Image (cartoon, rainbow, N blue to C red):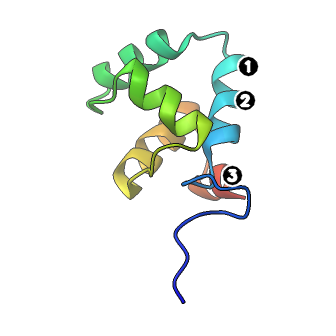
Amino acid sequence: MFKNKNEDGSLNLCGKKVAELRKSERLSQRAFADKLQLAGMDLNKNAIQQIESGQRFITDIELKAIAKFFDIAVDVLVN
């Protein structure tokens, strides 16, 4: 049977890491969303909150944009 949730019930693998990286940059969720929008990724504060809490799936395009923002490999986000 196909699973689309983690063992902890979250819908993505990278939410906690995204939150950790965002906080290390001292960015609010709104400021982070604003910076991503300037980079061409249309995410708002609510989407960031849902990604970080594991309540929202994240697309590969969003994953790539977030990794690029933090200047890290996508693998760092999902591992």
Q: Amino acid at mark 1?
A: Ser
Mark 2: which amino acid?
Glu
Q: Are marks 1 and 2 in contact (CB under 8 Å)?
A: yes
Lateral position of residue 53 relative to residue 41, left or right: right
**Relative to the observer, which residue lies in front, 76 or 17?**
17
Residue at 54% across / 54% down in the picture?
11
Instruction: Write down the residue under mark 1.
Output: 24
Q: CB under 8 Å between callouts 3 and 1?
A: no
Q: Secondary structure at mark 1?
A: helix
C-alpha gap between disc 3 and disc 1: 15 Å
- Sequence-wise, the earlier of marks 3 and 1 is 1
Mark 3 Cα-neighbour bin, 10 Å: few <14, some 14–19, many ≥20: few
Numbered mark located on residue 76 in the image: 3
Q: Amino acid at mark 3?
A: Val
Q: Quadrant of residue 22?
A: top right
Badges 2 and 3: C-beta atoms under 8 Å apart?
Answer: no
